[in-house]
Amino acid sequence: MKFRTRNREEFDLNLTPLIDVVFLLLIFFMVSTTFQKEADLQVQLPSATQEPTAQPVDKLEVTINPQGRYFINGRELTNNRLETLRTALAKMSRGQRDIPLIIRADAQTPHQYVVTAMDAAAQLGMLKLSIATATAGEAQP
């Protein structure tokens, strides 16, 4: 028996496509990366002599105590009627419909007073209304 030896072909691993892909990725990241350059120029701005104006109200908070009395940003209203509450909300919001309104009612407050506050906000077309609650671990005063 005669065994023949076969000539083995040598495997050649072509790295050219791999290098092409790596270079393409490198170019992609170089092009898509943005660099933010901070201005090195320091400028001293002039100051104005005008007196500061009243800061605009950034939120309205309606607080309702257990007796049904309304407080807007800590100021008590003269009565608890819908018209009074609506007028006070319109005055404090200065016609801004997108100002956040937070209703904070005591746990013992009758539900009707909360509904009245929500109704006043709806009549004014206020868009951002939320009701404040206490978390389970929060201490009650």
Image: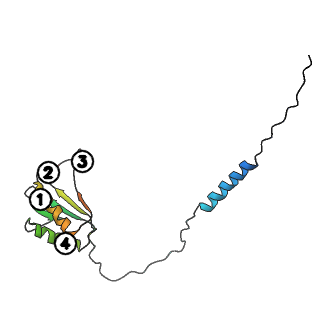
Instruction: Describe residue 42's horizontal placement relative to residue 74 as left or right.
Output: right
- Pointer 2 local density, CA inside 10 Å: few below 14, some 14–19, many at least 20: few
Picture coordinates of residue 101 (x, y %)? 23, 63
Instruction: Describe residue 47's horizontal placement relative to residue 110 as left or right.
Output: right
Picture coordinates of residue 19 (x, y %)? 73, 50
Mark 1, mark 3: which one is toward the viewer?
1
For numbered disc 1, what is the local secondary structure? helix
Mark 3, mark 4: which one is toward the viewer?
4
Mark 4, mark 2: which one is toward the viewer?
4
Identify the residue under disc 3. Answer: 135
Q: CA distance from mark 3 to mark 4?
A: 31 Å
Query: What number is the disc on residue 113?
Result: 1
Image: 1 above or below 117: above
For numbered disc 2, what is the local secondary structure? loop
Q: CA distance from mark 2 to mark 3?
A: 13 Å
Q: Earlier in the sequence, mark 3 or mark 4?
A: 4
| Residue located farthest toward the right when viewing the structure as drawn | 2
Image: 56 above or below 100: below
Q: Earlier in the sequence, mark 4 or mark 2?
A: 4
**Residue name at image x 88 percent, y 31 percent:** 7
**Residue name at image x 68 percent, y 51 percent:** 22
Identify the residue under disc 2. Answer: 107
